[in-house]
Image (cartoon, rainbow, N blue to C red):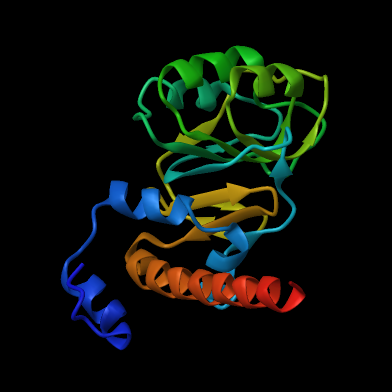
Amino acid sequence: MDSSRKAGDTMQADLSSPLSTAELVQRLAAIPAANISDAQERIGVASALSPSWPGARLAGPAYTVWTRPGDNLYIHKALEEVQPGDVIVVNGGGDQSRALIGDMIGIRARNQGVAGFVIDGAVRDADALAECGLPVFARSVTPAGPYKFGPGRLQIPVAIDGVVVAPGDLVIADADGVVVVRRDDAEQVLAQAEAIEAREEAKRTAFAGAAS
C-alpha cells in the first residue's frame, strides 16, 4: 500500500481496486467474527450455531444446500460439485433429531479441500471431525444418523438461524459463532472490520502499558 495514503482514504482506495474472493477470505479470516459482526451493524449473525469441537475456525464463500430435515442426500450431491475453499452451508430446518453429517462426510470433504460446514441442524462424530480437522458449526450433536431420500436444492439462497445466505456470500466462524457477509458488501465490511480491529489492538497495547 502507498505509504502516502491517508488513513481516511482506506475504504475509498479498497473500493477502487476490487479484491478477489480469495483476498477477501484471507483478510476476513484474520479478524474475529465479533469484529466482523460489529462492522456490519451486528447483523448477519447465526447465534444458534456453534463449533462442534473446540478451536474450529473457518472462512470461505458459501456453497448452499437446502435439505429436508434429517435427510442428507443433497449434501452428498453438493460434494460432487463443491470447489476447494468453499464452505458448505446447509439449511436443515433447525432439526436436531438426526445428524446431517458425520466423520465419513467430514473426511471426504476435507480431502476435497472444503473449508468446513455450517449446518442449521445437528451433526455427529464430533471427536472424529476434530481429529480430521474439519471445521463444523451446527445447532447440536446427536448420535442419530440421517435418511437419504431427499428432496433438496443446491446453490439457491437459504436461511440458517434466520440469516439469509446466498451462494458466494462469505461465511466466517470462530469460537464466538457464525457471521455471514453479503458478497456485494464484503469490501466495505472488510475495511470497517480491519479498522475496528486496529482500534482494539491499540487499546490493548495502551491497557498493557498502563498495567505495567
Picture quarter containing residue 68? top right
The single residue placed furthest to the front in the displayed view is 212
Tell me: residue 58, above or below residue 11.
above
Q: Is residue 29 above or below residue 202?
A: above
Lateral position of residue 87 relative to residue 50, left or right: left
Q: Exactly how many numbered labels are in the figure?
A: 0
- Compare residues 159 and 194 and report the one nearer the observer: 194
Is 30 in front, or is 130?
30
Q: Is residue 119 left or right of residue 58?
A: right
Work out whether residue 163 can be spotted: yes
In the displayed structure image, the side of residue 142 where residue 164 appears, left or right: left
Q: Position of residue 74 (x, y in %)?
A: 51, 26
Which residue is at the front of the view, 195 or 142?
195
Rendered position, 22 above or below 10: above
User: Percent from the top left, x then y, of residue 129?
Assistant: 66, 21
**Residue 168 visible to an observer of this rendering:** no
On the rendered image, what quadrant is the N terminus found in? bottom left
Q: Residue at x 58, y 58 (%)?
A: 32
Q: Residue at x 55, y 75 (%)?
A: 202
Residue 79, image x, y percentages: 44, 22
From the viewer's perspective, is residue 36 above or below residue 13? Answer: above
- Quick one: 193 or 49, which is closer to the camera? 193
Q: Quadrant of the C terminus?
A: bottom right
Q: Position of residue 150 (x, y in %)?
A: 57, 25
* Residue shown at 58% from the left, 53% from the top: 159
